[in-house]
Amino acid sequence: MKPISIHDFLWEPSKFSSKAICVVFGNDPFWKFHAVRTLRDQVLSEEDAEFSLTRFEGDSVKFIDVLREVATHAMFGGDRRLVIVEDADSFVTKYRAELEEYTEKPSGQAVLLLLLNSFPSNTRLFSRVTETGLAIEASSLPEKEIPKWIVRWSKQHHKTPCDPDAAEMIFQRIGAEHGLIDQELAKLALMVAPKEKITTTLVEKAVGSWRSQSTFEMLDLALAGQTAAAIRQLDQLLLAGENAVGILAQIAPTLRKFAAATQLILDGEKHGKKITPAAALEQAGVNRYYIEKKSEKQLKMLGRYRGAKLLNWLLQADLDLKGASRNDPRIILETLIINIADPRLRLL
């Protein structure tokens, strides 16, 4: 068997009951949190169940202490215990043989939950857990799937419908950080009248800090060819304490979609097929709301030369900000803005 996705697990947790040994692994703290909370609710369903929950730090706990805990009878909350080993990568490395042996005959009265960053599939422990236990991969969604997830998450977890255009706007303003999106949805749900839904009007009014809004205003200025104004906006963001890597992370999804749309147009021309900018943007994952509002005009202004160069420029800026260049982060971002905004490049 294969590990199950955290998204399948959370949408219908009743399909995946907890086992004597469970592993949650991946790179996203938000999804790990929800996986643990859902498993806790499955295992410890009684009112006093928290008395039957034990947490250990993986870098300091000994296997014998974990083994003793899973063998202890629950005092409250029914007859089951939940024993969690957090940050358990080093724990698994140190006690792999003992854990493999434990999977052969686990405790019948407790659930052992290991929280890992990685869970290599070429190990015997992986095979044993996926065969007899429960392995959940808690990884981030691809960016193109996040707006659809926002719609579903808002309805299921916040009991509030969200318009697809509003979901796209939330993603554009907040970025791909699931935890921040969840916080914004919780706030918006409180602002929506009964039987109403989250709309673009509400999102425009309520979502995004001054910094996040200013970041996208900076990008809009650059795409409009207003180089000086875009750089002034960049300076304001940096003076306000915004991190250069964070600024790049916010604008990168939009620029990658422009790059994909440009490539679709160029590929179409090679095969004698004309693809309109609007159609290319839609295929690249840009919401129709933004295509009509500004994206089509921006892509035309950008031009095919700069559009084809975007991915290389983004990659270089990312590498430079992470140590490949000794230049000041401001200079790195300024170079990117100039490349995007320079109207002379549109004619090449």
Image (spheres, helix red, strand yellow):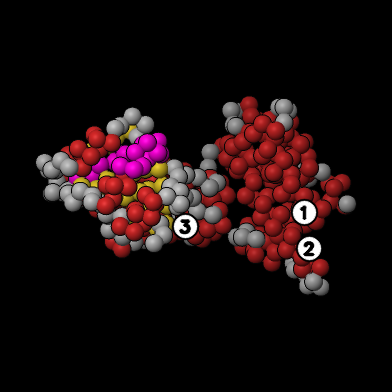
Query: Are the residues tagged 2 and 1 within 8 Å (C-beta)?
Result: yes
Which of the two labelled residues, at mark 2 and mark 3, occupies the earlier sequence position? Answer: 3
- From mark 2 to mark 3, how far is it between C-alphas? 31 Å
Rendered location of residue 297, percent (x, y): 74, 56
- Reply above or below: 141 against 58: below
**Mark 1 Cα shell of 10 Å, populated few (<14), some (14-19), many (≥20):** some
298 or 182: nearer the viewer: 182
- At a point 47% along the width and 57% down the height, the residue shown is 149
Q: Secondary structure at mark 3?
A: helix
The residue that disc 3 covers is: 149
Contact, mark 1 vs mark 3 (Cβ under 8 Å): no
**Residue 241 drawn in magenta:** no
Which residue is at 27% across, 47% downward?
A: 102
- For residue 275, above or below residue 187: below
Residue 287 picture location, percent across and down: 60, 60
Decide which of tag 1 and tag 3 comes sooner along the chain: 3
- Indicate yes or no whether the magenta region holds residue 92: yes
Amino acid identity at mark 3: Trp
Q: Which residue is mark 1?
A: 308
Amino acid bearing label 2: Leu
- Check disc 2 and report the residue beneath it: 266
From the viewer's perspective, tell me whether residue 169 is left or right of residue 46. right
